[in-house]
Amino acid sequence: MRHGQTSWNLEKRTQGGKDSDLTALGIRQAESLRKKFQKIKLDSIYTSPLKRAYTTAQMVAKDQNLNCILDDRLVEMNFGDWEGLTHEEIKKFYPEEFKTWRMEPHMAVIPNGETISVVQERMVAFLNDIIIQSNDDNILVVSHSATIKLLLLHILSMNLNHYYNLQQDNCAINLVTFKPYGPVLVKYNDICHMDIMMER
Protein backbone atom coordinates (compact mmCIF):
# COMPACT_ATOMS: atom_id res chain seq x y z
CA MET A 1 0.00 0.00 0.00
CA ARG A 2 0.97 3.62 -0.44
CA HIS A 3 1.58 6.02 2.44
CA GLY A 4 -0.90 8.67 3.58
CA GLN A 5 -1.15 12.15 2.12
CA THR A 6 1.76 14.51 2.82
CA SER A 7 2.12 18.27 2.72
CA TRP A 8 4.17 17.99 -0.47
CA ASN A 9 1.45 15.85 -2.07
CA LEU A 10 -0.91 18.75 -1.44
CA GLU A 11 1.54 21.23 -2.94
CA LYS A 12 2.21 18.91 -5.89
CA ARG A 13 5.91 18.89 -5.06
CA THR A 14 8.11 16.03 -6.16
CA GLN A 15 9.24 14.19 -3.04
CA GLY A 16 11.38 11.25 -4.11
CA GLY A 17 14.00 10.62 -1.46
CA LYS A 18 13.16 13.86 0.33
CA ASP A 19 10.37 13.82 2.87
CA SER A 20 7.47 15.79 4.25
CA ASP A 21 5.11 15.06 7.11
CA LEU A 22 1.71 13.46 6.81
CA THR A 23 -1.10 16.00 6.74
CA ALA A 24 -4.05 15.78 9.11
CA LEU A 25 -5.88 14.04 6.28
CA GLY A 26 -2.93 11.68 5.78
CA ILE A 27 -3.06 10.68 9.44
CA ARG A 28 -6.80 9.98 9.16
CA GLN A 29 -6.14 7.92 6.04
CA ALA A 30 -3.54 5.85 7.89
CA GLU A 31 -5.97 5.46 10.78
CA SER A 32 -8.58 4.07 8.39
CA LEU A 33 -6.00 1.51 7.27
CA ARG A 34 -5.31 0.56 10.88
CA LYS A 35 -9.02 -0.12 11.37
CA LYS A 36 -9.15 -2.11 8.12
CA PHE A 37 -6.33 -4.39 9.22
CA GLN A 38 -7.71 -4.96 12.72
CA LYS A 39 -9.68 -7.84 11.20
CA ILE A 40 -6.74 -9.22 9.22
CA LYS A 41 -3.84 -11.09 10.84
CA LEU A 42 -0.56 -9.90 9.38
CA ASP A 43 2.61 -11.97 9.68
CA SER A 44 5.09 -9.25 8.78
CA ILE A 45 5.24 -5.59 7.76
CA TYR A 46 7.94 -4.20 5.49
CA THR A 47 8.25 -0.50 4.85
CA SER A 48 10.29 2.15 3.13
CA PRO A 49 12.41 3.97 5.73
CA LEU A 50 11.14 7.37 4.54
CA LYS A 51 9.07 8.80 7.38
CA ARG A 52 5.84 9.22 5.37
CA ALA A 53 5.78 5.47 4.71
CA TYR A 54 7.22 4.41 8.07
CA THR A 55 4.68 6.52 10.00
CA THR A 56 1.84 4.97 7.99
CA ALA A 57 3.19 1.45 8.56
CA GLN A 58 3.60 2.04 12.30
CA MET A 59 -0.05 2.99 12.65
CA VAL A 60 -1.09 -0.35 11.15
CA ALA A 61 1.51 -2.23 13.22
CA LYS A 62 0.03 -0.94 16.51
CA ASP A 63 -2.70 -3.59 16.61
CA GLN A 64 -0.61 -6.37 15.05
CA ASN A 65 2.08 -6.70 17.74
CA LEU A 66 4.67 -6.47 14.96
CA ASN A 67 7.77 -4.40 14.36
CA CYS A 68 8.05 -2.66 11.00
CA ILE A 69 11.00 -3.99 8.99
CA LEU A 70 12.83 -1.27 7.06
CA ASP A 71 14.06 -2.05 3.55
CA ASP A 72 15.91 0.58 1.50
CA ARG A 73 14.70 -0.99 -1.75
CA LEU A 74 11.21 0.28 -0.96
CA VAL A 75 12.18 3.98 -0.95
CA GLU A 76 10.58 6.22 -3.54
CA MET A 77 12.22 6.77 -6.90
CA ASN A 78 15.11 9.23 -6.75
CA PHE A 79 13.95 12.25 -8.75
CA GLY A 80 17.34 13.96 -8.53
CA ASP A 81 17.28 17.69 -9.28
CA TRP A 82 13.50 17.67 -9.46
CA GLU A 83 13.00 16.87 -5.77
CA GLY A 84 11.34 19.72 -3.91
CA LEU A 85 10.07 21.32 -7.13
CA THR A 86 6.44 21.59 -8.18
CA HIS A 87 5.28 20.15 -11.49
CA GLU A 88 5.07 23.67 -12.91
CA GLU A 89 8.62 24.46 -11.81
CA ILE A 90 9.95 21.27 -13.39
CA LYS A 91 8.10 22.07 -16.61
CA LYS A 92 9.64 25.56 -16.58
CA PHE A 93 13.26 24.64 -15.77
CA TYR A 94 13.47 21.23 -17.47
CA PRO A 95 10.98 21.45 -20.37
CA GLU A 96 12.42 18.75 -22.63
CA GLU A 97 13.14 16.27 -19.85
CA PHE A 98 9.68 16.84 -18.37
CA LYS A 99 8.02 16.30 -21.76
CA THR A 100 9.83 12.98 -22.15
CA TRP A 101 8.90 12.00 -18.58
CA ARG A 102 5.23 12.61 -19.33
CA MET A 103 5.09 11.18 -22.85
CA GLU A 104 7.75 8.43 -22.75
CA PRO A 105 8.59 7.75 -19.09
CA HIS A 106 10.60 4.64 -19.98
CA MET A 107 12.97 6.88 -21.99
CA ALA A 108 13.27 9.68 -19.43
CA VAL A 109 16.61 10.59 -17.86
CA ILE A 110 16.02 12.85 -14.85
CA PRO A 111 19.10 14.94 -13.95
CA ASN A 112 20.92 13.18 -11.09
CA GLY A 113 17.95 10.83 -10.60
CA GLU A 114 17.05 7.21 -11.21
CA THR A 115 15.43 5.76 -14.30
CA ILE A 116 12.24 3.77 -13.87
CA SER A 117 13.98 0.61 -15.07
CA VAL A 118 16.49 0.87 -12.21
CA VAL A 119 13.68 1.44 -9.69
CA GLN A 120 11.75 -1.53 -11.04
CA GLU A 121 14.84 -3.74 -10.73
CA ARG A 122 15.19 -3.04 -7.00
CA MET A 123 11.48 -3.57 -6.40
CA VAL A 124 11.57 -6.91 -8.24
CA ALA A 125 14.65 -7.88 -6.22
CA PHE A 126 12.68 -7.15 -3.03
CA LEU A 127 9.77 -9.22 -4.37
CA ASN A 128 12.01 -12.18 -5.15
CA ASP A 129 14.12 -12.01 -1.98
CA ILE A 130 11.47 -11.22 0.61
CA ILE A 131 7.99 -12.04 -0.65
CA ILE A 132 8.44 -15.11 -2.83
CA GLN A 133 10.97 -16.71 -0.49
CA SER A 134 8.85 -16.06 2.61
CA ASN A 135 6.79 -18.62 4.47
CA ASP A 136 4.52 -15.89 5.85
CA ASP A 137 0.88 -15.93 4.79
CA ASN A 138 0.09 -12.21 4.94
CA ILE A 139 2.81 -9.66 4.27
CA LEU A 140 2.11 -5.93 4.24
CA VAL A 141 4.43 -3.72 2.20
CA VAL A 142 4.26 0.06 2.60
CA SER A 143 5.93 2.05 -0.15
CA HIS A 144 5.38 4.90 -2.61
CA SER A 145 3.48 5.76 -5.77
CA ALA A 146 6.21 5.23 -8.38
CA THR A 147 7.70 2.13 -6.74
CA ILE A 148 4.33 0.42 -6.35
CA LYS A 149 3.30 1.19 -9.92
CA LEU A 150 6.56 -0.21 -11.26
CA LEU A 151 6.19 -3.39 -9.21
CA LEU A 152 2.62 -3.82 -10.45
CA LEU A 153 3.77 -3.38 -14.05
CA HIS A 154 6.17 -6.27 -13.47
CA ILE A 155 3.48 -8.44 -11.87
CA LEU A 156 1.12 -7.72 -14.77
CA SER A 157 3.86 -8.30 -17.39
CA MET A 158 3.27 -4.78 -18.75
CA ASN A 159 5.95 -2.70 -20.42
CA LEU A 160 7.41 0.33 -18.67
CA ASN A 161 5.87 2.69 -21.20
CA HIS A 162 2.52 1.94 -19.49
CA TYR A 163 3.69 3.71 -16.30
CA TYR A 164 0.95 6.34 -16.54
CA ASN A 165 -1.77 3.75 -17.13
CA LEU A 166 -1.68 2.96 -13.41
CA GLN A 167 -2.67 5.17 -10.49
CA GLN A 168 -1.87 4.96 -6.79
CA ASP A 169 -3.93 7.04 -4.37
CA ASN A 170 -2.72 7.77 -0.87
CA CYS A 171 -3.24 4.77 1.42
CA ALA A 172 -4.56 2.63 -1.44
CA ILE A 173 -4.32 -1.15 -1.03
CA ASN A 174 -3.15 -3.51 -3.77
CA LEU A 175 -3.75 -7.18 -2.95
CA VAL A 176 -1.54 -9.73 -4.70
CA THR A 177 -1.82 -13.46 -4.12
CA PHE A 178 0.92 -15.87 -5.15
CA LYS A 179 -0.18 -19.02 -6.96
CA PRO A 180 1.99 -21.90 -8.24
CA TYR A 181 1.72 -20.33 -11.71
CA GLY A 182 2.64 -16.81 -10.54
CA PRO A 183 1.28 -13.68 -8.87
CA VAL A 184 -2.35 -12.61 -9.29
CA LEU A 185 -3.54 -9.02 -8.74
CA VAL A 186 -6.77 -9.39 -6.75
CA LYS A 187 -7.37 -5.77 -5.72
CA TYR A 188 -5.94 -2.63 -7.29
CA ASN A 189 -5.79 0.92 -5.88
CA ASP A 190 -8.50 -0.02 -3.36
CA ILE A 191 -9.62 2.90 -1.18
CA CYS A 192 -12.99 1.45 -0.12
CA HIS A 193 -11.80 1.49 3.50
CA MET A 194 -11.73 5.27 3.42
CA ASP A 195 -14.51 7.11 5.21
CA ILE A 196 -13.19 10.46 3.94
CA MET A 197 -12.85 12.05 0.54
CA MET A 198 -9.49 11.51 -1.08
CA GLU A 199 -7.37 14.41 -2.27
CA ARG A 200 -6.14 13.51 -5.74
Image (cartoon, helix red, strand yellow):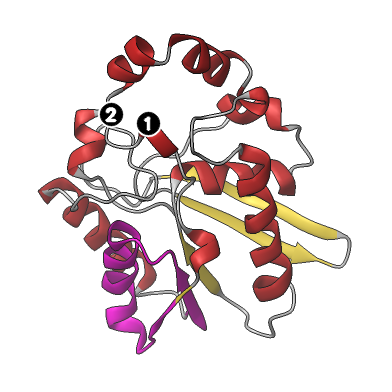
Residue lying at 33% horizontally and 67% vertically, measured from the top left: 54
Magenta includes 187?
Answer: no
Foreground of the two, 117 or 66:
117
Residue density around tag 2, few if under 14, some if 14–19, many if 20 or more, within 10 Å: some
Q: Residue furthest left?
A: 24
Which numbered tag is attached to residue 85? Answer: 2
Magenta residue span: 42-69
Query: Do the residues bearing badges 1 and 2 touch, measured as CB atoms within 8 Å?
Result: yes
Q: Amino acid at mark 1?
A: Trp
Residue 184 located left or right of residue 87 = right
Q: Position of residue 163 (x, y in %)?
A: 61, 30
Q: Position of residue 62 (x, y in %)?
A: 27, 80
Q: Classify residue 109 by image quadrant.
A: top right
State the residue position of label 1: 82
Residue density around tag 1, few if under 14, some if 14–19, many if 20 or more, within 10 Å: many
Q: Is residue 188 visible?
A: no
- The quarter of the image holding the N terminus is bottom left
Please, is residue 17 above or below residue 134 in the view? above
Foreground of the two, 114 or 179:
114
Residue 16 located left or right of residue 162 = left
Residue lying at 65% horizontally and 75% vertically, measured from the top left: 130
Q: Residue furthest front?
A: 112
What number of labels is visible?
2
Which numbered tag is attached to residue 31? Answer: none
CA distance for labels 1 and 2: 6 Å
Residue lying at 46% horizontally and 81% vertically, measured from the top left: 41
Q: Indicate the secondary structure of the residue bearing disc 1.
A: helix
